[in-house]
Amino acid sequence: MTLVGLSSRVTRKSRSNFYYAFLALPRARREALYAVYAFCRIVDDIADLGTDAAAQRVGLAAWRRDIARCYDDGAQPEHPIARQLAAAVRRFSLPRTALEAIVDGCEMDLQRTTYETFDELAPYCYRVASAVGLCCIEIFGYTDPSARDYAVSLGMALQLTNIIRDVGVDARNGRVYVPQQDLQKFGVTGDDLRAGRYGDDFVRLMAFQAARAREYYAKAWASFPTADARALVPAEIMGRIYFALLAEIEARRFRVFDERVTLSAPRKAAIAVRCWMNGMLAVRPSGRLA
């Protein structure tokens, strides 16, 4: 199997919402995005699926060395996905600080299981999501520097949506990303999340989290560079699918304990088509659902 085939298989196997965004890209950019996504998936799995913290740190350290090799013309990365990532680095000038931040974010999952305030949580969200966005926009291409602000805010919004959707699963796996300060404010405990206790207090807590996520979606769209609308269609597809997912969770009154809330493939495809059409017309995104 080719390196491109390997990273493509990782992406397809993950059944990610991002896959619909990948399809909107020309081949070279799509292959680079496959490499970035596969890298993110692998380092995330090191932190999420392992049980030996020392071995997990060794695994993440190996990836840090491979990232360094991606920027050293005389070095060859060891991991096959890292070799494809190196090609993307050379072709699209992916920021090394962003790739390293992604690994740092995954390592945070080995260091702590709760966050006292949102200010403590925000750096984690930036590292595991906004930093990914900063890599992606280099692949998409842009001319307006505000695209970086857009990528950072959109990454925060996507990660906060993930936290809402996966709050029960994460808690059962020993991690509570909802700030402790918020839990206390609404009278919900970590044990409530682990046990999947659904009630009015939980709904109010999740509505508060959803409002925060919506603030970041609004920030992203306020900084959206219309001049780069066509190039950023893949980013908009990601954002609009996740925005619709958040709305679906809200419509179900945050019943996220019983099953994983998802959007159907036809609905995702419809969102992707609308984003593509808006991009061709250089339409600034709004807060309305696609």
Image (cartoon, rainbow, N blue to C red):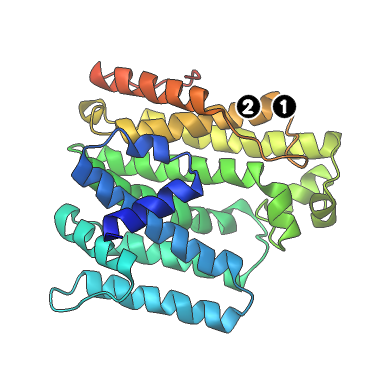
Instruction: Report the amino acid beneath label 2.
Output: Glu
Instruction: Report the amino acid beneath label 1.
Output: Arg
Query: Would residue 131 be visible to someone looking at this image?
Result: no
Dots 1, 2 in contact, CB < 8 A: yes
In x, y percent, where is residue 288? 49, 18
**Total labels drawn:** 2
Rendered image quadrant of residue 119: bottom right
Q: Residue at x 32, y 78 (%)?
A: 65
In x, y percent, where is residue 16? 48, 43
Q: Which residue is mark 1?
A: 252
Q: Residue at x 74, y 28 (%)?
A: 253
Taking the image as shown, residue 41 lies to the left or right of residue 204, namely left
Query: Would residue 184 be visible to someone looking at this image?
Result: yes
Rendered image quadrant of residue 116: bottom right
Taking the image as shown, residue 102 lies to the left or right of residue 86, namely right
Q: Which residue is mark 2?
A: 248
Q: Residue at x 27, y 30 (%)?
A: 225
Taking the image as shown, residue 11 lies to the left or right of residue 79, namely right
Q: Quadrant of the N terminus?
A: bottom left
Please state which of residues 236 and 62 is positioned toward the viewer in this rendering.
62
Taking the image as shown, residue 112 lies to the left or right of residue 188, namely left
Q: Residues within 10 Å of mark 1 (few under 14, many from 20)?
A: few
In x, y percent, where is residue 233? 31, 30
Placement of 246 over or under 152, stated as above or below: above
Q: Secondary structure at mark 1?
A: loop
Q: Secondary structure at mark 2?
A: helix
